[in-house]
Image (cartoon, rainbow, N blue to C red):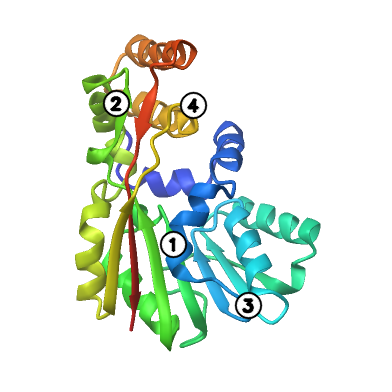
Amino acid sequence: MPEPELFVEHWANVDAESMARYEIMFQWSAAADAFYAAADIRDGLIVADFGCGPGHTAIEFARRVGPGGHVHALDINADFLERTRQKAVSARFVDRITTHLIDSERLPLANAVLDRMTARNTIIYVRDPSATFAEFRRVLKPDGIVHVIEGDWALTAVEPLGEEWRTLVAAASWSWRTPDIGRRLHGIVRRAGFSRISLEILTKPDMEGRLLGMIRTVAGLARESGRLEPARINAALDSVDRSLVDGTFLAITPQFIVTARL
């Protein structure tokens, strides 16, 4: 089985096949619009996207904050940041987006500079969520807002796989620092000293294959673990493909959304 810290290596050095999948998975969508609604990203704000990936969210934020605002896109992956810069050039948002490579627990931002700190499906990977939220507090203005979106792998479901999905998730669990981060998020944020905390759980059942990238990612991580026979993993993926054809496919991945102020 891979060493536990290899999940950091994965995100710092994403292979070409995974990168192509992430470019599709992380595109802005109607679901993303709902996930970020409470963050209230609007004209003139200074916003950070922690774990920006290939930049789709940062570009949408740049559009929303307008020429009077700014977006700080942060990631541990240099290729993600380069892709973000390329998208900024194409969208003519170069003056609105600054990219930052994260190479330590301390964020490369000054104290009290942000109106919003956002993170989606990234706290699951950090070594110390409490230390991360302490950094979020440091870089937020006194009236700033932190807005975090995380899943919880034990609460996901994929049909027709049933319990076989649980087996795949268990085999892939080496890749997540805190697989059940969703249910823990509210408590972590409160202990970090934030107040006026709101929590909602959103999920949009998928019957068309929108979450197929997620399923294939889990299958790939399970394969990498060495805990399951490749034939078993392939059979599970074949079953998913057949269900998309016959109309019996269903995937659910609840997202815990915490919004809080200092």
Q: Nearer the viewer, mark 2 or mark 4?
A: 4
Residues tagged 4 and 1 counted as in contact (Cβ below 8 A): no
Write down the residue under mark 2.
168
Q: Is residue 233 above or below residue 60?
A: above
Disc 3 from disc 2: Cα separation: 43 Å
Which residue is painted at 45% across and 46% down in the image? Answer: 9
Mark 2 touches mark 4? (CB < 8 Å): no
Q: Which residue is mark 3?
A: 43
Where is 151 relative to 170, above or below?
below
Could you tell which of marks 3 and 2 lies nearer the N-terminus?
3
Identify the residue at image location x=28%, y=73%.
197
Q: What mark, if any, has residue 208 been given in the picture?
A: 4
Where disc 1 sits, the SS reads strand
In the picture, the disc for residue 21 is none
Indicate which label's residue lies in the foreground, 1 or 2: 1
Q: CA distance from mark 2 to mark 4?
A: 21 Å
Mark 3 touches mark 2? (CB < 8 Å): no
Residue 49, x across and y down, in percent: 52, 65
Label 3: which secondary element: loop
Q: Residue at x 46, y 72 (%)?
A: 117
Q: Is residue 128 visible?
A: no
Whole-number angstrom distance, CA of label 3 to CA of label 4: 35 Å
Residue 71, quarter of picture: bottom right
Amino acid residing under circle 3: Asp
Vertical position of residue 74 compared to residue 168: above or below: below
Residue 13: % across, % down: 53, 45
What secondary structure is found at the residue carrying circle 4? Answer: loop
The type of residue carrying mark 2 is Leu
Residue nearer the viewer, 203 or 194: 203
Q: Quadrant of the C terminus?
A: bottom left
Q: Specify the label residue 119 is tagged with.
A: 1
Looking at the image, do the residues carrying marks 1 and 3 touch, with CB atoms under 8 Å apart?
no
